[in-house]
Image (spheres, rainbow, N blue to C red):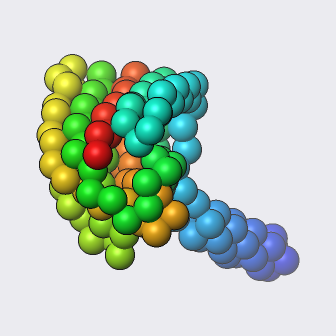
Amino acid sequence: MAKQRRSLRYFTWLHRLATTVALLLLTGCLLISGETTMIDLQDGSGNLLTTFVGAEGQQERTLDVGLPATELQVIVIVGVESGDLTLSLLQPEGSVVFAVAARPDLQVTRSGSVRTNERGQLRYTVNAAAARNGSYQIFVQP
């Protein structure tokens, strides 16, 4: 009986440790199912459209515009059927220029000026919590 208790305690401890390690590994990770992305860029102008069935987590992404250290006019449209979806546009040093948070069954639009980094990339983060049937679109123009 004492062996069973020790074995059960060991298994419980091991299970908690494995769960903690898995959570740490998934931190900063965006899990998306059914993702489709279309990019149409010419001479630094164009758009990116991403749709998905389900999303959970957070991740920084980039859009290669090909115009290094350039101020761009950006329009962002975010929508989700249920859950939470936020897209944040970042300056080259990492500060947030603006964020757009979707509301269930309602598209939200925001625009502003954002600077690309020295490699000509527009940086943004996607943050999703139990997001279902969502999309985001980014329009850029110098």
Q: Quadrant of the N terminus?
A: bottom right
**Left or right placement of residue 52 versus residue 90 in this view:** right
Residue 117 image position (x, y, % from top left): 42, 66
Q: Residue furthest front?
A: 43
Q: Is residue 6 above or below residue 114?
A: below
* The quadrant where residue 94 appears: bottom left
Residue 4, can we see it?
Answer: yes
Q: Nearer the viewer, residue 123 or 20?
A: 123
Q: Nearer the viewer, residue 43 or 102?
A: 43
Q: Is residue 87 above or below residue 12?
A: above
**Who's the residue at 43% across and 54% down the image?**
67
Q: Nearer the viewer, residue 68 or 31?
A: 68
Residue 69 image position (x, y, % from top left): 37, 65
Q: Residue furthest right?
A: 3
Q: Is residue 89 above or below residue 46?
A: below
* The quadrant where residue 8 appears: bottom right
Residue 83, can we see it?
Answer: no
Q: How many marks?
A: 0
**Left or right placement of residue 13 versus residue 142 in this view:** right
Residue 57 image position (x, y, % from top left): 45, 51
Residue 75 image position (x, y, % from top left): 22, 38
**Who's the residue at 30% across and 66% down the image?**
91
**Left or right placement of residue 37 versus residue 14 in this view:** left
**Who's the residue at 29% across and 46% down the image?**
142
**Left or right placement of residue 52 versus residue 138 in this view:** right
Q: Nearer the viewer, residue 62 or 1?
A: 62
